[in-house]
Amino acid sequence: MPELTPFLRPWLNAPRWYVAFSGGLDSTVLLHALHAYGQRHAAPPLCAVHVHHGLQAAADTWPGHCQRVCERLCVELRVIRVHVEAGASLEQAARTARYAAFADELEEGAVLFTGQHRDDQAETLLLRLLRGAGVRGLTAMPAARRLGRGHLVRPLLDCSREQLRDHAERAGLAWIEDPSNDDVRFARNYLRGEVLPVLRQRWPQVGQSLARSAAHLGEAQDLLDELARDDLQTASAGQAFAWSGVDSLGLQALKDLSPARQRNALQYWLAPRTRLPDTRHWAGWEALRDAAVDAQPVWRLTDGHLLRSQGRVWWLHGSWLRLPSGGVTWTDPEVALALPDNGRLRLLGAPLGGALRVEYRRGGEMLEVPGRGRRDLKRLLNEHQVPTFIRQRLPLVWQGDRLLAVANLPELAGTAVQAHWTPPDSAQDLS
């Protein structure tokens, strides 16, 4: 097993080190290696985290095993029980639940070490090849990445499973053998137990070769990411309605790219926002891109919607996907008003006597505009190129049957009073 010091040195200033400790071979070797390092060097405090999925009866005994191992090492153990949602892939659902639990556990700057190794890289590449993944999906597991408020680090990626087993046996370590690992109904187990042994008979270095290919694909993805950043810099120009906190891209700048570059730029832009669509679902982008100018197409993705308005494509998620409830009476306009599912509203300017009412557009509203007389609100919003999704939740301040102000559009203020709206999910609201 290689010396771990080069992999650990960048993380010595972390407030705490965590180990994803299943009790299996890989995580047992990693836990003992990190503990041994901490005995010889100054290192952050070490804590093991065991996630109990409750998917099989044998798993009920594993926390006890992990507790005994940690007690012998004088390492803190945290056991987290998670619920795995039923779905097409039990493996993926368990992984999602596990990493969500890890992310919740990490404090700012903390590091979670996991035991993935070189053979895991090879299996992952084969799985994704068989599923028809693109370059992004075929890239190697990174040695480090962000996770929640901290970082996930994989220091064993240069080791094979055989090397880890040899080390564990020489060191007299005890570990759990998960009986489900022999169940070849699971795709990864089938590759590990049935396919890779056959490949090794013909190509003994298949694990190293596949891991090297994954690394080459990672370099190719880095180049594609550079291209995406250049393309997005152009598409991000002229960002409109920044106060909304809604990210957008210029549609024409995207349409000027080849279809492949469009997909590459959007994949990069969407990756931190939602699970990326597979090849079949990119027809949703084409329909949105090519719709008539007066259409209002929507591309529905896992964690939000991409829609088109005023020559831009906009990413909506969270509260932006739900229309606000009905009007609210504002009894004390000198105090900011919390709008149900729609952020906050406050008045700027001369105070008004009496209660006000906050409503949303229904159609037919008229506003007294200084120097222009009474104007139809719909036409005014068209003049200011306000996107449809903002119009639907833009607070309107009324006094009796008089429309006083339209939030965040001071040029439409019919009086000396202006309404400042902090929308939901915006940077201001989160702060």
Image (cartoon, helix red, strand yellow):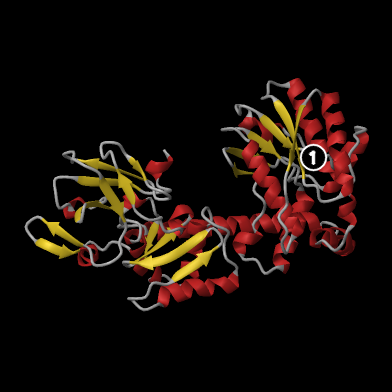
Q: Is residue 44 left or right of residue 255?
A: right
Residue at point 76%, 34% (across, down): 3
Left/right of residue 39 with respect to residue 384 in the rendered view: right
Q: Residue at x 91, y 36 (%)?
A: 174
- Residue 431, by quadrant, is top left
Place of residue 18 in the rendered image (x, y in percent of width and height, measured from the top left): 70, 33
Rendered position, 106 above or below 379 = above
Tag 1: amino acid = Ser
Q: Element at badge 1?
A: helix
From the image, tell me which residue sits under label 1: 27
Task: Judge whether 27 appears above or below 382 on screen.
Answer: above
Q: Report x, y in % for residue 344.
A: 35, 44
- Residue 217: % across, % down: 63, 59
Say if 373 sits above or below 178 in the image. Answer: below
Name the one closer to the observer, 121 or 392: 392
**Where's residue 37, x and y in %?**
75, 26
